[in-house]
Amino acid sequence: MLENFHFEIQMEIMNRLPIKSILQFRSLSKTCKSMIDNSAFRAHYHTHHQHLLIAHYDPFNSKAYDISYVSITDHDDDDETFPQHKHFPTVPMLVNMLEHPVVIGSSHGLVCVFGARPKNRMDSTCIRNIALIWNPCIRRVIPVFVTTAGYRMYRTFIGFGVCRATNDPKIVKITHIKHESDIERISSIPLQVEVFTLSTGVWRWPYSNLPRKSVQFVMMGNQVVVDGFMYWRGIDRVKTNDGYTSYSLIISFDITTEEFGEVNLPDSLAHEPFHKLCMANLREFLVVLHRNVETNDPEAVVWMMENGVSKLFTKLFTITVSTPYERLSGSRDASVIGFRKSGQPIIELLDDNLQSSELVVYEIYSKRIDYLDVYGLWGMCFVYPYIETLLLLDQPDLAGYNEMEATEYLDSFVS
């Protein structure tokens, strides 16, 4: 049927379809497959269908450090049926085989998961790890070998984003000094920054505009990608007469130009303990959440970074969750871990009785709570928004590997 339309009209029609229909059309005819496999179409195809990937450590899973994944379709309205749009994505065996996995972040429909190679043999200076670039919608996964610094003096931090100018996925590897006592002694950090681009398949070493060596990157996995920039949390360690003092800041990375920058936080946030702060994407704006547990009811103050060179932060509102909860009678703590497309916060509620937590969507004004029936270990639940995209469709299909095939592939990949 599509063959009766002009090519440009076909492209326009196809670009409006959800990705499930696109994949079905791809198998109908050579014409459809050729059109969908066209690099220009793949690069520009994306729908407004947003999903939320929830990565959580399931308290009912016998393997305590295995991540479970839930995806929820997120329509752009106040939809009371949101919890019903939940499904469990097919997770490639390569992802499931990582040891101590960490979801680095999401960008343009792709998710990056970082972890150790199974049965990894370590030497004293280098630990072998793998980053997996994963498209949950089309079940494609690409492994990238990552050499990390030894833990004695350095730590390695990983970031991920897709360049909006080229649609090229990039992995950023940053090495920072572990102990403040080594800052003055170390004149320069070897291979401080490396950037991997999928199109070339190689790591490069930018030589200018690198992060200051006094900056320590914290909370790998709590990155935000907004408007072509990656944002990470950092701590600047400043030498004083009495030793060192530290304050929080945000480090930015332009995915296109590959330049680093610093974003200063308001004084009221910069000197707070780093575990009381986290970042999130609220309607394509970077926000910082300040968690306050000293009040009777748990609350989070939301600060939004304004556009412009000054990078000023404005206090938006305060989210207060009243207790007790009808299903978690022993609950005494709550933490905002992300936002829906509509702006509703997703909150993790702690249950003292079970030593676990449950995720809910909270309506700020009506104070209505919608339970998602997703449970996790406290502080180990994360939300990553992603859109439907065809990126990685041209890559080899490794997602269907069984455990033996995945093991053989990983062994050959890092040998």
Image (spheres, rainbow, N blue to C red):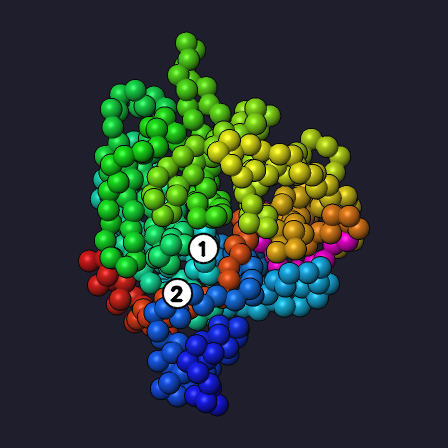
Amino acid type at image mark 1: Ser
- 81 on left or right of 217: right
Where residue 189 appears, x then y in whole percent? 26, 31
Task: Give the residue at x 52% y 75%.
Answer: 17
The quadrant the C terminus occupies is bottom left
Where residue 231 appears, x then y in whole percent? 46, 42
Where residue 314 appears, x then y in whole percent? 62, 34
Secondary structure under tag 2 reads helix
- Is 40 rendered above or below residue 179? below
Residue designated by label 2: 43
Label at residue 107: 1
Task: Give the residue at x 25% y 57%.
Answer: 201
Q: CA distance from mark 2 to mark 1?
A: 14 Å
Judge the density around disc 2: few (<14), some (14-19), many (≥20) Cα neighbours within 10 Å: some
Given residues 109 and 85, the one toward you in this image is: 109
Where residue 85 appears, x then y in whole percent? 63, 68
> Disc 2 vs disc 1: Cβ atoms closer than 8 Å?
no
Q: Is residue 375 magenta?
A: yes
- 50 on left or right of 315: left
Dominant secondary-structure state across the stretch colored magenta: strand
- 69 on left or right of 141: right
Task: Give the residue at x 46% y 61%.
Answer: 109
Label at residue 366: none
Q: Is residue 30 magenta?
A: no
Foreground mark, 2 or 1, reads 2
Task: Give the residue at x 43% y 39%.
Answer: 252
Please give the range of residues in magenta: 368-378
- Is 349 rendered above or below residue 201? above
**Residue 359 is at least partly visible in this image:** no
Amino acid type at image mark 2: Ala
Judge the density around disc 1: few (<14), some (14-19), many (≥20) Cα neighbours within 10 Å: many
